Amino acid sequence: MNNSSLKLVLISPPIGYLGSGCGGGVELTITSLIKGLLMLGHQLTLVAPDGSTLPDDCSAVEIIHVQGASQQSWQHSAPDCPIVIPSEAVLPKLLEHALEIGGSADAILNFSYDWLPIWITSKIGTPLFHLISMGAVTRVMKTVIEELALWDQQRLGFHTQSQANDFKLAEDPVIVGNGFDLSKYDFIKDKKGPIGWAGRVAPEKGLEDAVDVAMALCEPLLVWGIVEDTKYAKEIDASVPSGMIDWRGFLPTSQFQKQLGSCRLFLNTPKWNEAYGNVVVEALACGVPVVAYDRGGPGEIIQSGRTGWLVTPDDVAALTDAASRATEIDRLTCRRWAEDSASQEAFALRVEAWIKAGMLKNEGRRSINA
Ligand code: UDP
């Protein structure tokens, strides 16, 4: 290890195991960040739910597997819902293990969007950082994040400014974007092909609007992703002629990118303040232009007229019009954007800078209190 390398403990989300798809985009984010941090020479331990796996090129990382019941995802909770931690929950156990190992580490980096790890941050010695993966879903989460920001905002990192805007913050937020192992995404030059959509199949992702565009253009829509809300998926499927939606399921990245790259265009239709939108960058990395609502992360990622088109949120007619102009976009420009702005190396450097600045601030606080 060189002098500036860090010993870090990473906490995986308490929703399913890493590789299950239940954790949404956070799963890919952790994997890319791990690869990037390893390239920078850092020493990593991952604390993750039982069954979690990492790709072969992450073998230098020690994984501590923890058993226990999953948390419910916050994005499907009522705005005023309380904090619920089930009996035999994995969340406190993940934290317990991380704090134990974290005693001899430089810092802990938490990926779980949960009340407990955020609340405990100001009460422990080891610097605990949080890469916040969603906007302000539920009042209790908004409050605990804002309270931590008041104590030390440097402990919080956000993916985009739009996401951070959900919270009342006294200082400019740390924005780290996201990063991808771009060697895993093949650039496809061909401008022909179907229309694609990908994401967790759940109401906040707005699949129904993408289906409306496909209907208006009289062609099927290819859909990838884990069906989180079966009732919602069935209702959409029943509302259109059979075969309109080509359900492709949840695929590993190697297969997903191959099919994604064959698309003429990719639709992204968030109904919530999308924190980032991994699938948008994955499409761009393959050279596929993205037509999306100008809402949340996609509104910051897509350069309208260069790498796709941004339209007024929820305006399906505008989305359809923009979709019919997707071939005007140069596919190589899309790929170049991903290379310049969303590589795993650049992402890891941004995260490293954030953590190191936070550790310095922590040292300052300690010496004042000593
Ligand atoms: N994904 C995948 N296989 C699929 C479809 C999607 O691995 O067949 C992954 C994709 O790579 C992305 C995640 O699902 O990392 C969705 O993340 P996104 O940030 O778009 O949305 P989130 O689920 O976090 O709200």
Image (cartoon, rainbow, N blue to C red):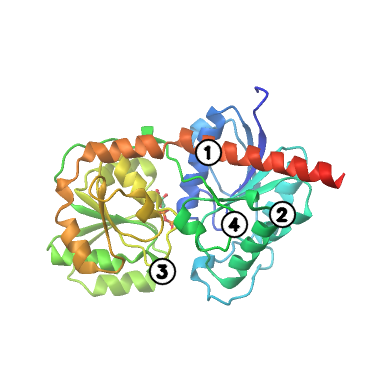
Q: Report x, y in % for residue 245.
A: 23, 63
Q: CA distance from mark 4 to mark 3?
A: 19 Å
Q: Quick one: label 3 or label 1, which is nearer the N terminus?
A: 3
Q: Which residue is mark 4?
A: 14
Residue 100, compared with residue 89, is above or below; it is: above
The amino acid type, in three-letter code, at marker 2 is: Thr
| SS for callout 1 | helix
Residue 210 image-quadrant placement: bottom left
Q: Quick one: label 4 or label 3, which is nearer the N terminus?
A: 4
Q: Report x, y in % for residue 263.
A: 21, 48
Residue 202 image-quadrant placement: bottom left
Front in this rendered view, residue 59 or 279: 279
Residue 170, compared with residue 193, is above or below; it is: below
Q: Report x, y in % for residue 342.
A: 41, 40
Q: Which residue is mark 1?
A: 350
Q: Quick one: label 2 or label 4, which is nearer the N terminus?
A: 4
Q: CA distance from mark 2 to mark 3?
A: 33 Å
Q: Quick one: label 2 or label 1, which is nearer the N terminus?
A: 2
Q: Could you tell whether 348 is left or right of 300 in the image?
A: right
